[in-house]
Image (cartoon, grey):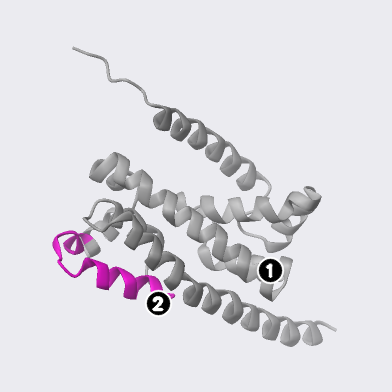
Amino acid sequence: MEKRRISGLDSITVFGLILTIAFIFYGYKSKLFVSTEALQNFLGRFGIWADIIFILIQAVQVIIPIIPGALGCLAGVIIFGAVKGFLYNYIGICLGSIIAFLLSRRYGLPFVGKITKPALMQKYGSWLNSERFDRWFAIAIFLPVAPDDFLCYLAGITKISARKFVTIILTGKPFAIAAYSMGLNLVFTRLIDTVIPMMK
């Protein structure tokens, strides 16, 4: 039986997965994924590279959801401010979404089944055969409550073109990210303003 040839993309994927797992282990030990303060201290070590590191972290959390998306968006605004935080969240999440789509398109349904929750596939699996997938996907990406990461993987095994997918992501993500970033920042600020006076 002929051995399957390992392509360059396969090698890069495996290498990236190893690095991601190593980073997840480090992040778990140092509590990066449950504390905005810990994440801020971690990024502070990288100086001028902190912005790029955060963008990459946001991309990784889409591909492998190690950080709750809401926490990542909130952290971006707290650490970098409203404008830069939104921009970095947007770039990172869009980048991760596109990579998730390409991985799914490359490796197919078995890959998606292994990397996502079965409950999500049961709930949204019927979308695969829908002629209106493009429309439902666009609406879901626009709303801040849909499982965007999973839907990006799901899109990769449908007939949607890569160009249309990227267009939907780039035009639909800003609204959901803004809702998360600004909304959670407002709640966080109100909470701090309420709790701190009570502790004095």
Residue at 77%, 55% (x, y): give it.
41
- In front: mark 2 or mark 1? 1
Dot 2 falls on a residue whose secondary structure is loop
Q: Position of residue 115 (x, y in %)?
A: 36, 46
* Residue 52 part of the magenta-drawn span: no
Quick one: which residue is furthest to the top in this view?
1
Q: Position of residue 131 (x, y in %)?
A: 15, 67
- Does label 2 or label 1 sit earlier along the sequence? 1
Judging by the rendered image, the residue that carries numbered circle 2 is: 143
Q: Tell me where residue 167 sits by quadrant.
A: bottom left
Q: Amino acid at mark 2?
A: Leu
> Does residue 165 appear anywhere in the picture?
yes
Judging by the rendered image, the residue that carries numbered circle 1 is: 84
Residue at 58%, 36% (x, y): give it.
22
Q: Amino acid at mark 1?
A: Lys
Alpha-carbon span between mark 2 and mark 1: 22 Å
Q: Is residue 144 above or below residue 114?
A: below
Q: Is residue 179 above or below residue 66?
A: below
Quick one: which residue is furthest to the front in this view?
163
Majority SS type along the magenta span: helix
Residue at 36%, 23% (x, y): give it.
6
Q: Are marks 2 and 1 in contact (CB under 8 Å)?
A: no
Q: Is residue 165 found left or right of 65 in the rendered image?
A: left
Q: Tell me where residue 120 sits by quadrant.
A: bottom left
Q: Which residues are drawn in magenta?
A: 125-145
Check the picture and name the quadrant holding the N terminus: top left
Q: Is residue 140 found left or right of 25 in the rendered image?
A: left
Dot 1 falls on a residue whose secondary structure is helix
